[in-house]
Amino acid sequence: MTEVTDKPSGEQNPIVQNLRKWDERAIAEVVEFRGELTLVIPREHLQRAAEYLQAEPGLRFEFLSDVSAVDRFPIEPRFELNYHLLSIPLRQTVRLRVWVSGNDPVVPTVVPVWPTANWHEREIFDLFGIQFEGHPDLHRILMPDDWEGYPLRKDYPVEGFRT
Amino acid sequence: MTTVETAAGPAQTMVLNMGPQHPSTHGVLRVVLELDGETVIKARPEIGYLHTGIEKSCEALTYSQAITLTDRIDYLAPLSNNLGYCLAVEKLLGLEIPKRAQYIRVLLTEMTRLNSHLVWLGTHAMDLGATSVMLYCFREREEILKLFEMVSGQRMMTSYFRIGGLALEPPPGWLDRVRWIVEMLPARIDEYEALLTRNRIWLMRTQGIGVISAADAIALGVSGPSLRAAGVAYDVRKFFPYSSYEEFDFDVPTRTESDCYARYMVRVAEMRESLKIVRQAMGKIPAEGPIKANAPGIVPPEREKMKTEMEALIYHFKIFTEGFSPPPGEVYQRVESPRGESGYFVVSDGSPKPYRVKVRAPSFVNLQALPKLSEGGLVADMIACIGTIDIVLGEVDR
């Protein structure tokens, strides 16, 4: 690692410092906006980081509030996954972000860590077409099973496709 | 279909479709049940029948126009959803809301909670055979809806909270109506409790039914009264106060049994707490003062100014033709809706339309716990379990 002198204020956050101490490579970037902390996690570290964040006594992010995807079409990597975590005992929150390429929209599942992710990931698969590797039951949830296309993608028109 | 071992030897299970047209599924929920006689072996909720693509529609509207869609997400608590969305956009913009508007917001969202819990209690009791409770609850709920109509002009799809404050000044005498409701309701809640709390049939139908452990509830993301009935005192109003909730004195009722009865007791206690907050808010709301933030270009100017000032006219034209553009970024705003943690994730790309609006619907997440609540129980208790999660299908499917 090269020496960075002017680290952003997010680096001082105890959550960031704890993760940095655990694995320097786990966080690719720290973003702070309107007082909300976002940690950009490389895709290959997501599952390990999730396990650590959930179980580590100093973090205890046992509650996964939400998983949401954003389509940044036509920028590549195209998709952004946001995991909103909450620690009830320590009253703290954090957002994890994973960038996913449009050519290879596959992400490891976090269902083993937070069972609530099951439906969230199904919803994202349904509306964005992102695959979750290792998901126990990945199929459409809101749209009909035989639906074609992924409605929340930016290249899908609001009115739908006329056939 | 699978074969199971019973006392009388091996037997075939039966697959039963419950819903989507079933009076006790509170809308269009379908549950595929696998039964061994009367026992539920597997329950698989099937959702999506009410999916209307609200999140996609939001991306085609300006920030202000999208408020009307948030009403329709959870039609029993429109103001809670208005508030969550408005707070998220205000956070993006960095807007400061006048105290008077904040207190009115608190008062009305607590009224919404009462409204929602009354509908829940009425329909849940009716599902379990206590029809009269439904009539009483809806009678009182009507009074709250009349208050909403008085304030916003609409009984249900209020859209009363706007970005930067409130849509319009509440009419004179509205607080008298609030006072009347606050004085009337405690005795009525006592009446519901007299009908149910020690009713032997009610106890048999709810006690020990649909139990979920606190650890399971957290793992499944359950929030709101269902989580508090498992002994976890997580309430967004206390944990991450918004709209000046930190200035109010109220308790977070919890129980530890985590069965249908505990969830009933928590909700009834919450109704009393909401009344406490409403009473405090009535005392706090100043008689006069601004109800909109001072943010030209975002909050529409007053009618009078529009007719006399050139600048106000230009702002008005710009707000309603192209809208306003928050800085690029994203925020996640949680609020405590009657059903649990309701979250709004709003992404801005610097244009006048939201780039993405994601709604964390508490009903959607809580419904995931249904198999945990009902599997191993009787098919008749399925009704109690669905009712006790308090789902609104509009919110589940969005």
Image: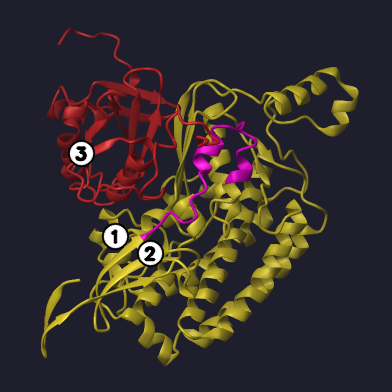
Is residue B140 at least partly visible in the picture? Answer: yes
Q: Amino acid at mark 3?
A: Ala
Q: Chain of mark 2?
A: B
Q: Is there CB contact under 8 Å for labels 2 and 1?
A: yes
Identify the residue at the far right of this view: B308
Q: Position of residue B105 (x, y in %)?
A: 63, 49
Task: Name the amino acid, label 1.
Answer: Ala
**Could you tell me which secondary element the residue under label 3 belongs to?**
helix
Q: In front: B64, or B309?
A: B64
Question: Residue B312: percent from the left, percent from the top?
Answer: 80, 23
Real-space Cα separation, disc 3 to disc 2, in angstroms: 25 Å
Chain A palette colour: red
- Asked which secondary structure carries label 1, the reply is helix
Label 1 to label 3, Cα distance in Å?
A: 19 Å
Question: In this image, A104 relative to B70: left or right?
Answer: left
> What's the distance in space between the residues labelled 2 and 1, CA to CA?
8 Å
Q: Quick one: label 2 or label 1, which is nearer the N terminus?
A: 1
The number of numbered badges drawn on the structure is 3
Q: Is residue A60 left or right of residue A77?
A: left
The chief SS type of the magenta part is loop
Q: Tell me if residue B107 comes above or below residue A94 in the rendering.
A: below
Q: Which residue is mark 1?
A: B217
Query: Which residue corresponds to mark 3?
Result: A50
- Asked if the residues shown at circle 3 and circle 2 are in contact, with their CB atoms under 8 angstroms apart, the answer is no
- Residue range in magenta is B46-69
Disc 2 marks a residue whose amino acid type is: Ser
User: Chain letter for yellow?
Assistant: B
B301 over B237 or under it: above or below: above
